[in-house]
Image: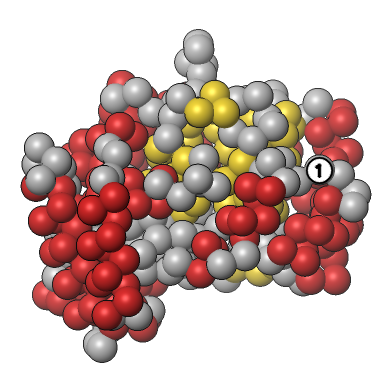
Amino acid sequence: MVQLGRTGFDVTRVGLGTWAIGGGGWEFAWGPQDDERSRTTVRHALARGINWIDTAPVYGTGHAEEVVGSVVGGLRPAPKVFTKVSLTWTADRHVTHNLKADSIRAEVEASRKRLRTDVIDLAQVHWPEPDTDIEEAWRTLAELKDRGVVRHIGVSNFTVPQMERAAAIAPVETLQPPYSLVWPDAEKELLPYARTHGIGVIVYSPMGCGLLTGTMTAERVEKMAADDWRRRDSDFHEPRLSRHLALARLLAEIGRQHDGRTAAEVAIAWTLANPAVTAAIVGGRSPEQVDGFVGAMNLHLTKDDLARIEAFRTEHP
């Protein structure tokens, strides 16, 4: 357990991400997903010791929150559930950005119903777009916190200047940036800023959306569902794909030297080795996937492990 910034929450170093269990049929889907398998996955993650879940209204255009709520909405003690605001959608499930106060209030109310809870543990601004409305959004979340509708407030995908603008209104309690060996840019400015200012950091996509699991192949990419957003992403195509798969092989080799840990666990442990990182959000669509990454919570990479990974990064930027 570690404390998430100044929230007072004690969280496991890995939390369950629910982007994929939103299912298919929307703009940023991961392909179809069976709901009962999703519920079994959530229960299994909790049974393995994970004590928090990260979700968002936009995942499956409300569906991921409904699935999570159907599992945790009556549990006592309940896991912490973190959700977001700012991404809305049209009737044809096209994703739009909205940081207006009325929209945020409506999103939070809808999330409370889907999650079957009176109070949301952590509400985060999902994306800071449009930039001109950041202050309005943050002021609204601060008001909802003051009213007791949400316990804590945070940001996701913000730059340092954007966090400073928010902090001028109310403290930024948490930050959720992408961070992995595929997308490491957060380590340049975001993570040092968060550490200096006591902001809890929960990084997302620590396995590069599947690229560093050790199970990804070029053939698997070709067979991805037509509505899987990764088919459109350059990191899943050459020349970047070969670089990432070679890195995954290195992580698997390091894992074998730690009593047979998986490449996924090593990839996650690498993010947790950064002193600014509190915990990592890891998506899972099945109990087997949970079993493949949950051990990252107590995997400590050696200086030699980290040096080997850094040498790869230098040779293959």
Residue 277, how many percent across, how many down? 51, 46
- Tell me which corner region of the image, top left, top right, bottom left or bottom right, holds residue 192: bottom right
Q: Nearer the viewer, residue 59 or 304?
A: 304
Q: Nearer the viewer, residue 239 or 3?
A: 3
- Tell me which corner region of the image, top left, top right, bottom left or bottom right, holds residue 227: bottom left
Residue 173, how many percent across, how many down? 71, 41
Q: Nearer the viewer, residue 263 or 152?
A: 263
In the picture shown, does residue 183 fall above or below 251? below
Q: Residue at x 44, y 29 (%)?
A: 12
Residue 257, how many percent across, how many down? 10, 45
Identify residue type, mark 1: Pro
The quadrant the C terminus occupies is: bottom left
Q: Residue at x 31, y 21 (%)?
A: 47
Left or right: residue 207 compared with residue 170: left
Residue indicated by mark 1:
171
Residue 40, how many percent across, how many down? 29, 31
- Estimate how packed mark 1 is, as few (under 14), some (14 to 19) or many (20 or more) residues with alpha carbons within 10 Å: some
- Res. 223 visible in picture: no
In the structure shown, which secondary structural element does the residue marked by tag 1 occupy?
A: loop
